[in-house]
Image (cartoon, rainbow, N blue to C red):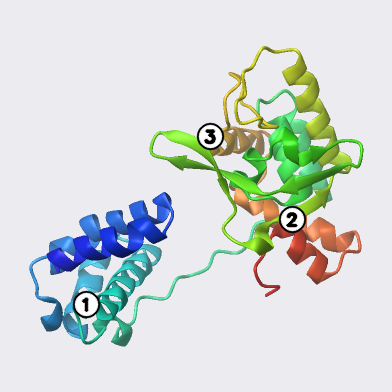
Amino acid sequence: YEQIRGLVRHLHIKPNREVKTHDFYKLMSEKRIKPYLGRMELQKVTPSDVTRMFKSIEAEGATANTVQAVRRTLRAAFGVAMKYGFAQDNPVARTFAPRVKRSPKVYFDADQVQALLTALQGSTVENIVKFALATGMRIGEATGVTWEGVDLELKVVLVCGQLQRVGSELVLKPLKTEKSLRTMPLVGHSLAAVQSEKRRQAGEDYENPLKLVFLNPWGRPFDPKYVNSRLHEALTKAELPITGMHSLRHSAATFMLMSGLNLHQVSRFLGHSQIA
């Protein structure tokens, strides 16, 4: 297994997947799978061996989400191993991982959103949170919006990239799928947020090599952890449930539907690959 682990990662995953995906598989392999199967021959790994590994990982305190992630990683590794002729069978396909208990989706009504906006006044993340609430963009998409993609005369914004952390650096990368590429109207809070950022940056001497619309107080790209931390502070101040930036997409979708957009339009604005 130890030999095929390296082959799969370097021959298949690294050249064909994003850096974050490769790092994820590496983490699952090194931390979760290697201690249990690292010394075993591929052909001798059975569904029972894999199931025992799942139970051991769970007994160590891992969540059902983590166990499922381990299962996905190992199943993918065996699948690639079979393509390369290193294995004849995928024992993971005949195992079951614990079911994940889905938490209720968090979304805010109009009064709660107003309370949040009031709490955000003066915050360093006020504009980007207002923008995300109005557009439903993912955090990486919102932090990755560039001035080249904004037309303030036509009041539209092009969503064509996302800001991602690669190692210790935040880099601008293209979206994963063509369906994620989309144009959205700038109205209400989203337009106000962009206009506010334009005025703020005009009064500063930022270099902004990526030409990002939203910059942190020091003129650098927004780190998602920083944005979520400031959002949590505002939610606490507004006495609202603590949630992350991604949950704002649910609120945005709700308001889009309430404003009269149909499901297909909302799905397209959110950049979903499927309407389901």
Secondary structure, mark 3, is loop
Disc 2 residue crowd, few under 14, some 14–19, many 20+, Cα 10 Å: some
Q: Which disc is residue 2 wearing?
A: none
Residue topped by disc 2: 182
Q: Nearer the viewer, residue 152 or 262?
A: 152
Q: Secondary structure at mark 2?
A: strand
Quadrant location of the C terminus in the rendered image: bottom right
Residue at horizontal 16%, vertical 79%? 49
Check disc 3 and give the amino acid type.
Answer: Asp
Give the structural element (helix, strand or loop) at label 1: helix
User: What residue lies at 85% left-to-right and 69% top-to-bottom?
Assistant: 262
| Residue tagged 1 | 50
- State how far apart marks 1 and 2 are (Cα): 42 Å
| Lateral position of residue 176 relative to residue 71, left or right | right
* Amino acid identity at mark 1: Val
Q: Is residue 116 visible?
A: no
Figure check: 272 above or below 251: below
Q: CA distance from mark 1 to mark 3?
A: 37 Å
Q: Earlier in the sequence, mark 1 or mark 2?
A: 1
- Residue 42 lies in quadrant: bottom left
> Which residue position holds label 3?
223
How many C-alpha atoms fall within 10 Å of the one at disc 1: few (<14), some, or many (≥20)?
Answer: many
Mark found first going from the N terminus, 2 or 3: 2
The N terminus, quarter of image:
bottom left
User: What's the amino acid at mark 2?
Assistant: Arg
- Which quarter of the figure has residue 166? top left
- Which is in the foreground here, disc 2 or disc 3? 2
Q: Quadrant of residue 154?
A: top right
Determine whether label 1 and label 2 are within 8 Å by CB.
no
**Residue under the point 18% across and 78% down:** 86
Position of residue 60 relative to residue 46, above or below, is: above
